[in-house]
Image (cartoon, rainbow, N blue to C red):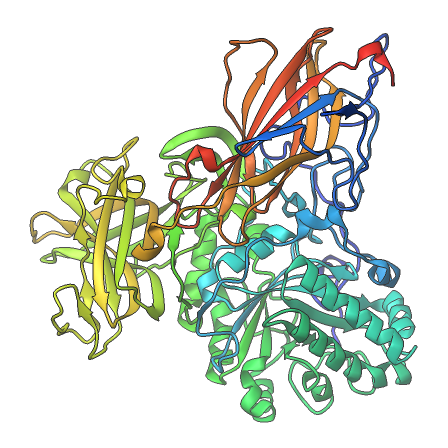
Amino acid sequence: MDRQLLPSEQKRFPGGGHGRPGPGRGRGRGWGRGPVPLGSVRVPGRRALATVLARPGGAGLPRASSRSPGSFQPAAESRGTTVLHESISTRPQPLPARQFDTSTTEPVSFFLSGLEELLAWQPDGNDDFNVAAVPLAQRQPPLRSRRPRTLVCHDMRGGYLEDRFIQGSATRNPYVFYHWRHIDIFVYFSHHTVTIPPVCWTNAAHRNGVPVLGTFITEWTGGEKVCEAFLAAGAEAYRAVSDQLARIAQHYRFDGWLINIENTLSAVAVENLPPFLRHLTAQVHSAVPGGLVIWYDSVLENGTLRWQNELNEQNRVFFDACDGLFVNYNWKEEHLERTRRLAGHRHADVYIGVDVFARGDVVGGGFDSDKSLSLIRKHSLSAAIFAPGWVYEHLGEENFLQNENKFWGLLADYLPTHSICTLPLATSFSLGMGTSRFLTGKEEEAGPWYNLSAQEIQPLYTESEGQLITSCCLQDAWCGGSSLRVQGTIPPGEERVAIRLFSFQMQAPPKLFLNLLYKMEGPHHDEFTVALELSTWHSDTCHDGDVTPLPEPHGRHHPRLLPAPPPGLSKLLAACSHGSHGWTSRCYELELQGCMLRDLSLLVSRHQSSPQETRFTCLLGEVRVLDAASVAASPPQVQSLTASQLWWQEGPDAQQLSLSLTLRWAFPPGRANHFRVLSLGTRCRRGQPQQPQLLGLAHACLFRVVGLAVPRPAAGQSCQLELLVEPVMPNELPVDPDRWGRLVLVYSEPAGGSS
C-alpha cells in the first residue's frame, strides 16, 4: 500500500521527508560556562601572548600525541597530583567542527551525511567524548527470549537538538524518556544518511538495560543514487558499507542499526540487498555483543517502493536476512493474522509499527495507542512505538511529565516489565534534568539543566485506580535533579500499603545492606512509618537469617533496621540515625540463604488503624541495595590526570581570562557511576581563599572545561588553578579525597611578550 504524506508529515517517521530544521541553540551549556564564547579574540593595545610549557630540564612545546592534540606531560607529580606550567596564549586553536561546537568548543554528538562521509570515517582521539561509557546492563528476560518485545523509535524535530551537547545544556522543560522498564529496544531516528545515536541516549538506555540502534537511511531520488553506488556496484562496495557501519557501532558502543531503504531500487541493486543485510548482520553480531540489525518495511523483492504493513512473501527475503522487521503503521487485524502465520517461531522478531501521531489509516494513536497494542499482543507480535515524543510535541512542555506518565500508564497492561539481575542497585531517581541540582538534600546549583547521561536507574512508574501514583518531583531531591514522589491512600481498616519499585530475578547474596532516604510531605507526616520490603521467589531452599523456612509462596522479608553503623561500615551508614535538610535516612541488613530476589517495595504504614482512608505523600531521595561482600572493596585511585587542548580568551574585563581545556584521566572501566569535576578556585597570592565550584559531571574519563573565568596574572606573577576529579561509585559510597584526581595548573604571561 503506497502512502502519500503531507509536507508537514514528511519529517516525522520512516517513510517521509528528508529535511531537518537547524538545531536550536540553548541559553547555556552545563556548568562553568564562561563570560564570552571562545574564539580568536584580540584586544587592541594588548601584547601578543604565546604558549610555552615549563618542564624539568628545559622548556619548549612537546610534540602532541595523535590521541590528544596539544596535550602536555606533567611537570611534576606527587601523590596523584599533576602539576602543569602553562604560559597564556589567545592565539586561535580551532578544534574539529564535527566533534566540537564551533562557538564554545563544547563536545557535541554528530551524524554522517552521505556515502562519502561514511566510507571516509575513521576513529580518532577527538571521538572519545562520543563513545558511550555505560555498558549494557543485564536484565531478565534477555532480548533473545521469545517474549514479544517493545521497540521505541525516537524521532523529534529532525534530531540532534539539545541532546547533541554531550556535557549537557541549560534547557528548561526538555524531552526525556524514562519508562525503560517497559521497553526492549531504543532507536534514534533522523533523516541523515548515518544517524549515530547521541551518546547521552546510549548511556541512559544502557544503564537501564536497553540496547540502542542507530539508523542508516536512503530515500527519494538522492537515495536511489546512493543505493546504485553501494548496492549495484557489487559485493566489494556493499561489504565496505556494512563493514563501516559495524565498526561505527563498535567504536561508539551502541548496539546496531535500523536499515531504512525508502527509494526504488534497480534490478541489480535489489538483488544485492539481501546479501548486504546478511553481511551487515554478521558483522554487527561479530563486532557488538548482542548486536541487532532491523529492516524497515518499505522496498519489495522486485525493487518497488511499496509499504506492505505486514510480513509477506514480497518482503520476507529481507526479514530472513537480518534480526527483525519493523512493519509500517497502516495495518489492520487481518495483516497481523497473516504476519503471525508467516513469521512462525520468529513472531517476536516482527515489530508492528504504532505511529503515536496517528497519521494515515491507523488503529489508534495518541492516548488511544493502547487499541493498537491490544491487537498486536493478541497475535503475540512485538510492537514498534514510533514518535512517542507526541506527548511533548503535541501536548506541550509544561505538563509533559504528567502527560508522559498518563501515556505509558495506558499502555502498561501490554508492556511486560523487565527485572534487574545484578547488584549494586543504587539510584536517586534523577531523570537527567532538573530546575536545580541537589547534593545531600541541599540545592547545590540553581537553574535548569539537561543531560541524559546523568539519568539514574529508573523504577516502575505505576498508577492503581487513583489509589497509588508514582511520579517525578523536580522541586526537591536528595541528589541530582529530582526525587520520586509516591502518593497514595491507605484503605479503611488497613495498616499499610506496599508500592513496588523494582523487580529482581537474581540469586540473593548471603547478606544485603539496604539504604533508604525519604521525606514525608503534608501536615500529618509524623503519623506514618516508611520502610523497605524485599520479596523472594518461592523455593524450598530459601531461608532468612534464622534458617527457618518461609511459609508464604513468595516470601516477604522486612530487613532489620540498623540504628548504628556496624564496624567497618561507617562511611555507608554514617547518616543512618539522622537525616539532612528534612530527609530521613534508614539503613537495613538482611541475611538470606538459597533465595532468589523478586521485588523491592516501599512500605508506608500508619501508626494506628483507622476506619477512615488516610492519604500520604512521600518523596524518595535514594534507594540502595548492596551486596555486603562488595561494600568492603576499596575504590581505585584516579590516575594520570592531564590537560590538553587549552584555549585562552580575553575575559569580560582586563582582570579576567576565559580558559577552556580538556581533562583526561585513567580509572578502571565500569567501576565509577560518574565523576564530579570540581574547581578549588584560583590563587594568585598566598593565603587567598579558595571557593569550590562544581564544573560538571563526567560520564567517561574525560571532561571539557568550557569558558572558566580565571584571574589574569600581573606582570612577573603566576596564578594557580586547582581542579579535582571525584569518582562517584555505583554503590554511592563516598571516596576518600586522597583517591581523587588533582591537577594544579600554574599559569603566567610569557616573558618578553613573544607570540
Picture layout, residue 444 above or below residue 10? above
Q: Residue at x 56, y 20 (%)?
A: 681
Q: Residue at x 35, y 65 (%)?
A: 503
Q: Which is nearer the eye, 674 or 418?
A: 674
Rendering coords of residue 685 (x, y %): 59, 8
- Relative to residue 91, is residue 324 drawn left or right? left
Q: Quadrant of the N terminus?
A: bottom right
Res. 627 visible in picture: no
- 415 vs 273, nearest the viewer: 273
Residue 7 at what x, y percent from top left?
A: 77, 59
Front position in the image: 550 or 498? 550
Q: Which quarter of the figure is the C terminus placed in?
A: top right
Q: Is residue 257 above or below residue 517?
A: below
When asked about the image quadrant of residue 62, the answer is top right
Q: Identify which residue is drawn at 67% across, 13% down.
A: 718
- 688 relative to 388, above or below: above
Q: Quadrant of residue 639?
A: top right
Q: Is residue 644 left or right of residue 182?
A: right
Kindly identify the residue that appears in the image at 54 percent across and 39 percent down.
697
Left or right of residue 118: residue 132: left
Label tally? 0
| Residue 710 sits above or below residue 269 on the image | above
Q: Hey, which quadrant is residue 584 in on the image?
A: top left
Give residue 226's position: percent from left, percent from top. 88, 68
- Residue 420 in the figure: left or right of residue 48: left
Give how far across and how far down residue 738 sits, in percent. Answer: 46, 33
